[in-house]
């Protein structure tokens, strides 16, 4: 069975997606302020490594876990609405790149799996 990483086109596709994605994020008034003062070249590299790993490709991600990596943003008010905006921008990017809806749904499921960690809260019991 092929991985999501392979289905979307591997490293070149992830690079293109991250570049387009951050263009959308930085133009989105709901969330752009969270990136004020951020070294975007470094951010892009970290995001590419994370997505490659999360989508089933080679694991070269060395960044902080989701909870620690976003704690400073939670302290600045990061909430579910902001998380949703990020997921919307990611889905719009993948749609723009011609990624099939079933793969975009898988990406959304991966994103949802880290929501509680990104937002610094304990998971809600099912």
Image (cartoon, helix red, strand yellow):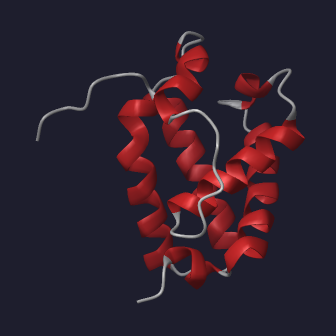
The image position of residue 112, as x and y in percent, is: 38, 48
Residue 95's image quarter?
Answer: bottom right
- In the displayed orientation, state which residue is furthest to the left: 126
Vertical position of residue 35 compared to residue 47: above or below: above
**Which quadrant, please, contains the N terminus?**
bottom left
On screen, residue 18 versus residue 1, left or right, reads: right
- In the displayed orientation, state which residue is furthest to the top: 75
Q: Residue at x 51, y 36 (%)?
A: 83
Vertical position of residue 93 compared to residue 22: above or below: below
Q: Residue at x 61, y 67 (%)?
A: 58
Q: Residue at x 75, y 57 (%)?
A: 18
Q: Residue at x 48, y 63 (%)?
A: 107
**Which quadrant, please, contains the C terminus?**
top left
The image position of residue 36, as x and y in percent, is: 82, 22
On screen, residue 2 versus residue 90, left or right, reads: left
On screen, residue 104 versus residue 58, left or right, reads: left
Residue 99's image quarter?
Answer: bottom right
Residue 69's image quarter?
Answer: top right
Q: Is residue 27 visible?
A: no
Vertical position of residue 39 compared to residue 27: above or below: above
Which of 116 and 59 lies nearest the eye of the viewer?
Answer: 59
Q: How many marks?
A: 0
Which of 68 and 19 lies nearest the eye of the viewer?
Answer: 68
Q: Is residue 31 visible?
A: yes
- In the displayed orientation, state which residue is furthest to the bottom: 1
The image position of residue 42, as x and y in percent, is: 83, 39
The image position of residue 61, as x and y in percent, is: 63, 50
């Amino acid at each position: 069975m092929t991985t999501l990483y392979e289905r979307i086109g591997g490293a070149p596709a992830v690079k293109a997606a991250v570049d387009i994605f951050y263009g959308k994020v930085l133009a989105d008034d709901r969330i752009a302020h969270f990136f004020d003062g951020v070294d975007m070249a470094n951010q892009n590299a970290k995001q590419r490594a994370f997505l490659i790993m999360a989508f089933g490709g080679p694991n070269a991600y060395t960044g902080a876990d989701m909870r620690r990596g976003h704690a400073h943003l939670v302290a600045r008010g990061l909430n579910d609405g902001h998380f949703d905006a990020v997921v919307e921008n990611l889905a719009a990017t993948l749609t723009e790149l011609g990624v099939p809806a079933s793969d975009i749904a898988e990406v959304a499921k991966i994103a949802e799996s880290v929501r509680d960690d990104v937002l610094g809260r304990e998971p809600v019991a099912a």
